[in-house]
């Protein structure tokens, strides 16, 4: 067992050094002779050889990176741990890298092992089995950013802004508070086999106390754009709903735009519904904004050293239609980019509730083991220059949804405004 772990360890050193280089932002070069020495050494020799390599790495303020302790603990585990069969080298490396990203303290900068990275892609481009909620954090607590349309979560009454305090799942042997869960742990724990139950202990701001909700998982199909037409006060209004900015959103959006342009009777106005839209691809939000904004800045990205303006690409296929936008506290990230650009550039009214407030941009990078890392690389700013992180975008017309009625009061107000 020790020989197996040592072999795996040596094979994984290159990966660890690569990831470490990404974190501290330095480049390094390993000579062939060093690698040969490293691969032929025993546990103590490996630590020594590794020290020689990491000794060349310096933090931005010229502080030496002490990496020997990693291998010191690794060696102790190999030699002393009671149940050596539980020492899975691959899982130990994944755990170390997860800890490295978690130590930054940014919940949106995360490392995803191969299986988790695959699931992340499914979120935007495919389907999966789960309850249908987008997860994030509110004041450091795991929260529902948005329940997805027509999913078990919606049917069970879970709402945007609900805090998830505890999760119980007998089949997966989970009965835990979520206080220390990372985002990827939460996703892994909440997804599962079809028709299996999971119980959430939730806190809702207007509830008298915490409460439990049990949901049965089902297949979650991600349809991101829907359009329907509604007659209101003698006018034909297009209700254009965008649920997420995913891999199929551009194609689905083009289909919806074509339907609006070809509608008979002619469309007199558009209600763009971004409620409970948790975001997605940055570029897609710019493409959609460009169908309303002929020219001008849609969003600016302020990176570590530079700032770049992203302007409308000028398609403007929907620029001549009266427009209002519906948002709520489940509208986040890319949906806030779109809503904010329409408000700042065109004076479009936002109706509903103040938005979530996620104002950072993550770059998705592949790692050589099939995993991935999401790194916060910048802040995005509205055309006005405002950074709305943790604050959200205030609405022009505040309308609170009455949960005791079946009527959609926010949509009703949107119809009234766009028909004037």
Image (cartoon, grey):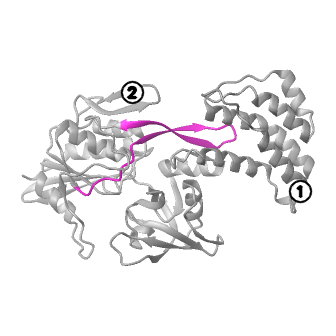
The image position of residue 248, as x and y in percent, is 42, 45
Describe the element under mark 2 as helix, strand or loop: strand
The image position of residue 126, as x and y in percent, is 50, 51
How crowded is the residue under tag 2: few (<14 C-alpha within 10 Å), some, or many (20+)?
Answer: some
Q: Which residue is mark 2?
A: 307
Q: Looking at the image, how many numbered discs can be counted on the residues?
A: 2
Describe the element under mark 1 as helix, strand or loop: helix
- The residue located at (66%, 72%) in the rendering is 173
Side of 294 relative to 236 (left or right) = right
The reply to whether residue 113 is visible in this rendering is: no
Closer to us: 328 or 243: 328
As drawn, 356 above or below 347: below
As drawn, 390 above or below 34: below
Residue 101, located in which quarter of the rendered image? Answer: top right
Q: Which residue is mark 1?
A: 80
- The residue located at (32%, 72%) in the rendering is 206
- Say if mark 2 contacts mark 1, CB within 8 Å: no
Marks 2 and 1, Cα distance to the nearest angstrom?
A: 52 Å
The image position of residue 378, as x and y in percent, is 44, 35
- The residue located at (50%, 52%) in the rendering is 123
| Magenta stretch holds residue 359 | yes
Find residue 142 and name its label. Answer: none
The reply to whether residue 180 is visible in this rendering is: yes
- The residue located at (48%, 60%) in the rendering is 141
Side of 333 relative to 181 (left or right) = left
Q: Nearer the viewer, mark 2 or mark 1?
A: 1
| Magenta stretch holds residue 328 | no
Specify start and end residues of the magenta stretch as a single range. 352-380
How crowded is the residue under tag 1: few (<14 C-alpha within 10 Å), some, or many (20+)?
Answer: few
**Of the residues under marks 2 and 1, which one precedes in the sequence?**
1
């Amino acid at each position: 067992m020790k020989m197996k772990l040592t072999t795996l360890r040596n094979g994984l050193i290159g990966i660890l050094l690569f990831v470490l280089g990404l974190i501290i932002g330095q480049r390094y070069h390993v000579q062939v002779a060093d690698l040969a020495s490293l691969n032929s050494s025993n546990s103590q020799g490996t630590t020594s050889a590794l020290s020689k390599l990491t000794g060349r790495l310096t933090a931005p303020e010229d502080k030496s990176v002490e990496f020997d302790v990693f291998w010191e603990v690794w060696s102790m585990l190999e030699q002393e741990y009671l149940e050596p069969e539980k020492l899975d080298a691959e899982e130990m490396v994944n755990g170390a890298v997860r800890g490295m990203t978690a130590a930054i303290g940014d919940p949106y900068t995360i490392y995803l092992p191969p299986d988790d990275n695959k699931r992340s892609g499914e979120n935007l481009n495919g389907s999966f089995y789960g309850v249908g909620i987008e997860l994030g954090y509110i004041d450091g607590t795991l929260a529902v950013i948005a329940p997805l349309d027509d999913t078990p979560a919606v049917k069970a009454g879970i709402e945007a802004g609900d805090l998830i305090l505890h999760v119980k799942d007998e089949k997966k042997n989970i009965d835990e508070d979520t206080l220390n869960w990372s985002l990827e742990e939460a996703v892994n724990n909440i997804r599962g086999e079809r028709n299996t139950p999971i119980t959430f202990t939730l806190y809702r701001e207007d509830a008298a106390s915490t409460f439990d909700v049990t949901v049965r998982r089902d297949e979650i199909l991600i349809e991101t754009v829907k359009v329907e037409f509604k007659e209101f006060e003698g006018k034909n209004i297009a209700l254009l709903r965008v649920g997420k900015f995913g891999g199929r959103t551009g194609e689905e959006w083009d289909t919806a735009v074509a339907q609006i342009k070809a509608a008979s009777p002619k469309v007199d106005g558009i209600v763009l519904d971004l409620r409970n839209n948790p975001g997605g691809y940055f570029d897609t939000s710019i493409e959609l904004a460009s169908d309303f904004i002929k020219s001008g800045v849609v969003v600016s990205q302020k990176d570590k050293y530079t700032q770049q303006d992203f302007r409308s690409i000028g398609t403007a296929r929907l620029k001549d239609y009266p427009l209002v936008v519906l948002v709520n506290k489940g509208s986040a990230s890319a949906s806030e980019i779109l809503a904010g650009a329409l408000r700042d550039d065109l004076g479009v009214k936002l109706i509903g509730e103040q938005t979530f407030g996620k104002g950072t941009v993550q770059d998705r990078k592949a790692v050589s083991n099939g995993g991935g890392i999401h790194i916060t690389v910048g802040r995005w700013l509205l055309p006005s220059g405002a950074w709305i992180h943790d604050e959200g975008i205030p609405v022009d017309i505040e309308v609170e949804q009455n949960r005791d009625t079946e009527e959609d009061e926010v949509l009703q107000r949107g119809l009234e405004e766009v028909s004037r």
